[in-house]
Image: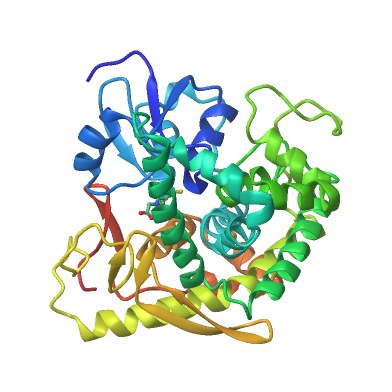
Amino acid sequence: MMNDHYTLYGAPVSLYTGKARSYLRSQGIPFVEVSPGSDRYLNEIVPTVGRWIIPCMETPDGTIIQDGADIIDHFERGPGQHLRKSSAYPESPLLLAVAHVFELFGGEGLLRPAMHYRWNFDEQNLAFIASEFALTMPQELSAEQAEKMFLHSSGRMRKAATVFGVTPESQPLIETAFHEWLDLFNAHLVNHPYLLGNRPTIGDYGLIAAMWAHLYRDPAPSMLIKQRAPRVGRWVERMTTTERYQHEYVGDDDELISDDKLPATLVAMMRYVSEEYLPEISAHVEVANQWLAEHPEIEAGTNGLDDPATRGLTGGRGLIAGGAATFAWRSIELTTSVMPYRFWLMQRLQDDLATASDGQVVKVREVFAEAGIDALLDLRTIRRVERSGHLEVWGPLL
Ligand SMILES: N[C@@H](CCC(=O)N[C@@H](CS)C(=O)NCC(=O)O)C(=O)O
């Protein structure tokens, strides 16, 4: 279908829509957001992308793109390039590598607090979330049907929270961990409006995924952020405006920080990622490698499962993914679902670093080692994750 604008199929309440929407707004790219309850989404977009998943974008010439990173890359490296103001990918290999770390962490590593603060504060959150979920449904549903559908989808999401590691045992630790994160990010934002300086990068767009719908917009964590880390709240607002929103900062250029010496506040945030997320992704890679080694028959270009739309390593529906990994986290053990999509994001970091000069690679390794996160540069699945036909598939046996 030809159109004169971009259409974003997504919802305010959705985590991953936030990444694409924030990019479009920050870059001043005009678009219309349409509900996934719309006829067009259900009858045209879902069959094209092979599963109910948001965000999806339809370009003016009718091309359909699924996945936040792919939507961004349409404007970064694809036909929409002339529409963006500034690139989300820093030129400095070090800054680019750091940005990728936070893209991965924001979209995948902050899911635990995101799910906890959404689903374990019913008294403050539930009426709001129910009203917001209704926006994702066909508008002709009766109130009774909408309520039934909400019970069904909220039940699935509560289940998803547990497969991301939110359990009665982990909940108090998730709160402690999130407070630490807010304090570190708030301290960094004293001197920098965005993660890497005066304009957003792919790191900010990754972080806004979890930080927008679940952690800033839902009532319970919204109160927490405003009380504990007001600068983080203003960063969220900054990430969702088209106009400049930098009242507390001097200067009006859009320069990134120098890569000669990273601010200590940023290195501290990287160290936090290494403690919070490195054990998890390492365990996921190990489990995936074991599974891949046991299944050499998997054809390249498939996920090796009966259902090509499956998100988890070994099966499962939607976010309730099959294939789990256990790892030590803080004082306890957690078991979480292994999702190949995360390896694909990690490959983006590693692929970009592979194009840097030897000297630059040494520099990246030094800084990553200082932050304790250098292992992320060498974690590899024995088969690459590729995206084909809007889905994650395994590449050839190497
Ligand atoms: N890798 C995808 C993930 C998108 C995603 O998981 N979206 C959620 C909503 S925020 C969804 O569609 N979930 C559907 C389900 O779990 O069935 C992206 O970054 O765009």
Image location of residue 108, percent across then percent down: 51, 60
At 58% across and 65% down in the image, what residue appears?
112
Count of picture labels: 0
Say left or right for 271 vs 144.
right
Q: Is residue 205 visible?
A: no
Say left or right for 12 vs 39.
right
172 relative to 42, above or below: below
At 26% across and 28% down in the image, what residue appears?
40
Spot the residue most to the top.
4
Q: Depth check: 173 or 142 in front? A: 142
In the rendered image, which quarter contains the C terminus?
bottom left
Image location of residue 365, percent across then percent down: 60, 68
Image location of residue 55, percent across then percent down: 40, 40
At 62% across and 62% down in the image, what residue appears?
120
What is the quadrant of residue 90 in the picture? top right
Q: Depth check: 198 or 359 in front? A: 198
Q: Which colour scheme is used?
A: rainbow
Q: Is residue 107 visible?
A: yes
Say left or right for 334 vs 368.
left
Image location of residue 35, percent across then percent down: 40, 32
In the rendered image, which quarter contains the N terminus?
top left
Say left or right for 91 vs 352.
right
What is the quadrant of residue 322 in the picture? bottom left
375 relative to 22, above or below: below
Spot the residue most to the front.
144
